[in-house]
Image (tube, helix red, strand yellow):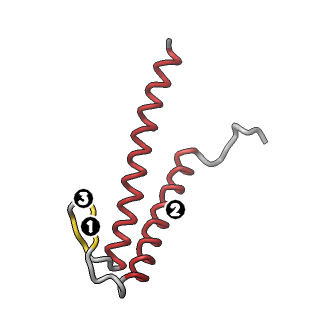
Amino acid sequence: MNETDSTTSGRRVVGWVFVAALALGVGFGAFVGLVISNDAAVPVGLFGVQFRPTPLNMASYGGGAVLALSGLFYVVMRYTRRYDDEIESV
């Protein structure tokens, strides 16, 4: 079998990696919230927004962090792809 005859596209692989990273972020956030929810009576803050570290709030934080980092990587990837296409055409 030739290496170029792949049955899995790159976009599908990246999509599954994103879904796995999002699930890990939400899962670890919920776990951390579950572990510290009894000990943490003081709210935690991020960018001026304060919330209590419950499992749901921490899972949301973990998912949001993964989404923000993935979005940042996506923007950088799109920018470098455009820059790389401009260099190849010269």
**Residue corresponding to mark 1:** 45
Q: Which mark is residue 64?
A: none
Residue 71 versus residue 23 in the image, above or below: above
Q: Position of residue 90 (x, y in %)?
A: 50, 11
Residue positioned most to the bottom: 38
Residue positioned most to the top: 90
Q: Which mark is residue 47?
A: 3
Residue flagged by tag 2: what amino acid is it? Ala
* Residue 31 as seen in the image, left or right of residue 49: right
Residue flagged by tag 3: what amino acid is it? Phe
Residue under the point 65% across and 47% down: 7
Cα gap from disc 3 to disc 2, whole angstroms: 27 Å
Residues tagged 1 and 3 counted as in contact (Cβ below 8 A): yes
Q: Earlier in the sequence, mark 2 or mark 1?
A: 2
Crowd tier of the residue under label 3, counting other residues whose Cα lies within 10 Å: few below 14, some 14–19, many 20 or above: few
Cα gap from disc 1 to disc 3, whole angstroms: 7 Å
Residue under the point 53% across and 56% down: 16
Residues tagged 2 and 1 counted as in contact (Cβ below 8 A): no
Residues tagged 3 and 2 counted as in contact (Cβ below 8 A): no
- Disc 2 vs disc 1: which is toward the camera? 1
Residue flagged by tag 1: what amino acid is it? Gly
Viewer-nearest residue: 63 or 1:
63
* Residue 44 as seen in the image, left or right of residue 9: left
Residue under the point 33% across and 79% down: 54
Viewer-nearest residue: 18 or 10:
18
